Image (tube, coloured by chain):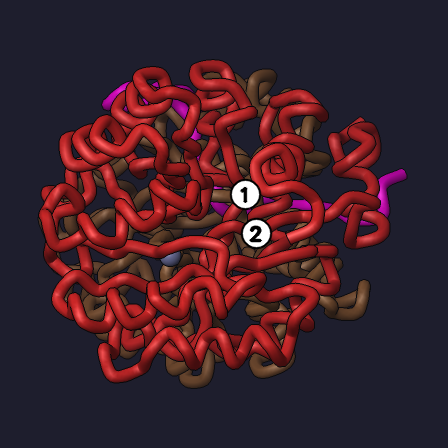
Chain colours: A red, B brown
Amino acid sequence: MSIWEEHPLARRFWKEGRADFPIYDMHGHMGSLNTIHLARAEADQMVAHMRRIGVKHLVFSHHHALFEPSFRNVRAWEICRNHPDILRMYVAINPHYPDHIREDLALFDSWKPFAVGLKLLPDYHQVPLNDRRYEYALRFAAERKLPVLSHTWGGSSCNGYPQLAEVIHKYPGLIFFIAHALFGDWEGAERLVRESAGNVYLELTALPGERGLLERLTASVGSERLLYGTDLPWFDEYQVVGGVLSADITEQDMRNIFYANVERLLGRDW
Amino acid sequence: MRELFFYDSMCAVGLPLTGGTAATTPDELHKEMDRYGIDKALVRHINLPNINAELSNEIVAEFVGNDHSGRIRGVWCILPEQCEELPKPDLLFRRMGESGIAALTLAPFSHRWIPCRLTIGRIMDAAAERHIPVLLDNFTGRWQELYAFLKEFPRNITMIQDRSKHGPDRLIRPLLEAYENLHYVISCHWVPEGIRDLAERYGAERLLYGSNYPIFSQGSMMLSLKQSGLPMDEIRKISGKNLENLLNGAQL
Ligand SMILES: [Zn+2]
């Protein structure tokens, strides 16, 4: 029998399209992008897609807030208010605009409960993560124990292992989500988790479906350190969930990835 | 009996040149297929770009020959005709039929030749005549070359895929619109509800399930297809019926 008939979680998603537990998607975006035709990039379309599979919250950073400095984070907050039950946001940090960072973070508390953390994009903003231009934002997050989701990639000179290791070491209070789990540099990702004080998580966007990878990371750092993410509107929730279900890991590992780790970190009501 | 028949159109086997794992025997592949409920697979040799066609073809024939279940069929690689490294089309196709080989591929960029009418015109015309599918897996990511190739060989039944994870709609839609014999393998089409969009626009007949094993797990795209929102008869076409029809239609 195949996993779709035999495995309790896989069977449920296969037959009913959703499970009886929430999914927290910890890495999303919104809005159009230069390099991809995104047919479902607006809030209503994304929310409809997520409701089918049972995503309880998506935490997103708006593409435009990341790539067009005149599009400010307040607009993402306004979008969240139209979908208060499901959308949450990362405040996008562009290190080239210190005034924007200070202004937006001054509003952070007023953007709660929708604002839950910060999003950094060092490769694209071309500023290494350990540059002092991130200090204000990182300190802000560390003091408040807010999650910071940073784009990472193996071998990158802006968000590769050395820059991450330095920042994680410098801010032990930070809850650090390593987006894409330092894609390709799996040893580096494993070291970052092992050498941390339990505050570092590998976020899985672009990994599920890669053969053998979740098995490896589950064995090396434990599924307690892994977070579900999709880059929605880039990737289909069913592909990502299907990738997790296809991995040869335990049901508890899958539950940790889909929701249990996030609930341990942020609770059930956020 | 399972509700869906799956035929994996994009599957590579053998000992990978640069390490890693892939099935080296039909039994190993069956085990993987059974885990996910894959009924049949069309296999290529994993080191094809790095070894010559005749060696790759020999290894694939041996692999398929060792499969006594009838679940596995193979893909052979072609070369420019002028160097006479492979038999002429008639003989090549006959040997394919005898060896359980159901489709062709080519690796011009690593085998150092130009994919066009000058080099493989005769064999491609013969393949078109006899409805033998041609996998363009080695054109993955080489969009300029792919566009030029399809312009030269619009009559051939062809199969393409993407591997970038970046939604390729801007690149594939013009091709699907222009070439009715072109089929798109969904292995890396991770676009939200993107399978349904393509099927509604170009017809479910144009799409094929394929895993890109061993890079991706064979299970990776199965749920996405099952929950695509398409009617079951269209899902059935994409999961296996289309490929089965294409391969059965080849006159070998
Ligand atoms: Zn992202």
Q: Residue at x 13, y 52 (%)?
A: B82
Give the quadrant of residue B126.
Answer: bottom left
Q: Which mark is residue A228?
A: 1
Is residue B46 found left or right of A18 in the rendered image?
Answer: left
Q: Quadrant of ligand 1?
A: bottom left
Q: What residue is pinned by disc 2?
A: A25
Is residue A187 found left or right of B11 in the rendered image?
Answer: left
What is the chain letter for disc 1? A
Residue A132 shows up from this direction: yes
Residues under numbered marks 2 and 1 in contact, where contact means CB atoms less than 8 Å apart: yes
Few, some or many C-alpha atoms within 10 Å of disc 1 (few <14, some 14-19, many ≥20)?
A: many
Could you tell me which secondary element the residue under label 1 belongs to? Answer: loop
What is the chain letter for disc 2? A
Which residue is nearer to you in this view: A248 or B212?
A: A248
> N-terminal of the two: label 2 or label 1?
2
What type of secondary structure mainly makes up the magenta span?
loop
Q: Which residues are magenta?
A: B1-23
Could you tell me which secondary element the residue under label 2 belongs to? Answer: strand
Percent of width and height locating residue A170: 21, 31
Q: Residue at x 33, y 73 (%)?
A: A65
Residue B22 shown in magenta: yes
